[in-house]
Image (cartoon, rainbow, N blue to C red):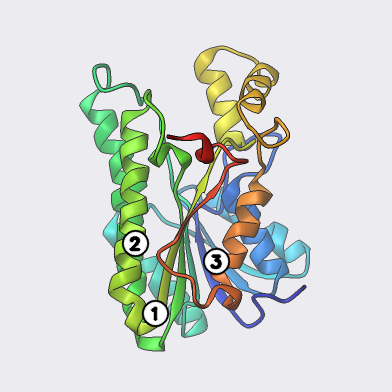
Amino acid sequence: MAGRLDGKTAVVVGAGQTPGDTLGNGRAMALLFAREGAEVLCVDRVGERAAETAAMIEQEGGRAAALQADIVQPADCAAVVAAAKARWGRLDILVNNVGIGAGDAPAHKLEEAAFDRILAVNLKGLWLTTRAAIPLMREQGGGAIVNISSLAGIAGGIQLAYEVSKAGVNRLTTSVAQSNARYGVRCNAIMPGLMDTPMAVAGIAEASGQSQAQVREGRNARVPLRGRMGTAWDTAYAALYLASDEAQFVTGVVLPVDGGMSSRIG
């Protein structure tokens, strides 16, 4: 079914991606939303990466623009929403696709600076963009916020800051959903499991000294469903549903997209 987001406006924060052979979650969501009829504002800390995603959308005949913003800066978050309002007069969809893990470690090894940086981006930055968007969404009578969390929010043991930040994203999601339901503003989250994205595979390979092929083989072996990782498109299609009117009665949901990994917990 084409046109699931016809007439919608969407901001995708984290629409660029790190270099790699595969597609990242943010870029996949921006591309898919545009293919389904939305006009997309592609936001990224690295402006060139946002512009590249916007250009890909336009090459396919879609409508897109790019904006550079660092979501740890409150003024930048306000500027993102202001740009959407100036361009469209409204903001129907906000996707918070933010997450870093560089320097993370177990509790006894984690440095304070790394903990602060990861929490600032993954949790506080996500809250800042959400805070900026809610007044406009309330004013216009509704909207959909989709947060990209992680399976690490409920499982793990070697990335303390990342795990804590994503657990926080899950709780932020349900809190925002409850406090804004009466205004027609929905808020949901996706918990991707092991995904074959540049940030995950190339990042782990570089940090561990393994080849990307070795990293893929090890990660694939851990996934119950068909013994292989998901892709950015799996995240994107879940986000498409949650952002669309098909999910108009869905809010406060934290949806695993993980090939069955979370069903083994407990």
Dot 2: few (<14), some (14–19), or many (≥20) neighbours within 10 Å? some
Give the number of the mark in front: 1 or 3. Answer: 3
Instruction: Please give the residue where the numbered disc 2 appears in the rendered image.
Output: 174
Dot 3: few (<14), some (14–19), or many (≥20) neighbours within 10 Å? many
Q: Kindly tell me whether residue 40 is visible in this rendering.
A: yes
The amino acid sitting under disc 1 is Met
- Point 68% across, 37% down: residue: 225
| Foreground pick, 139 / 240 | 240
The numbered mark, 2 or 1, whose residue comes first in the sequence reads 1
- Element under label 3? helix
Quarter of image, res 179: bottom left
| Foreground pick, 113 / 156 | 156
Instruction: Please give the residue where the numbered disc 1 appears in the rendered image.
Output: 137
Up-down relation of residue 209 to residue 118 (above or below): above
Q: Kindly tell me whether residue 54 is visible in this rendering.
A: no
- Point 30% across, 60% down: residue: 128
Of all residues, the one furthest to the front in this rendering is: 266
The amino acid sitting under disc 3 is Leu
Up-down relation of residue 205 to residue 253 (above or below): above
Circles 2 and 3: CB distance less than 8 Å?
no
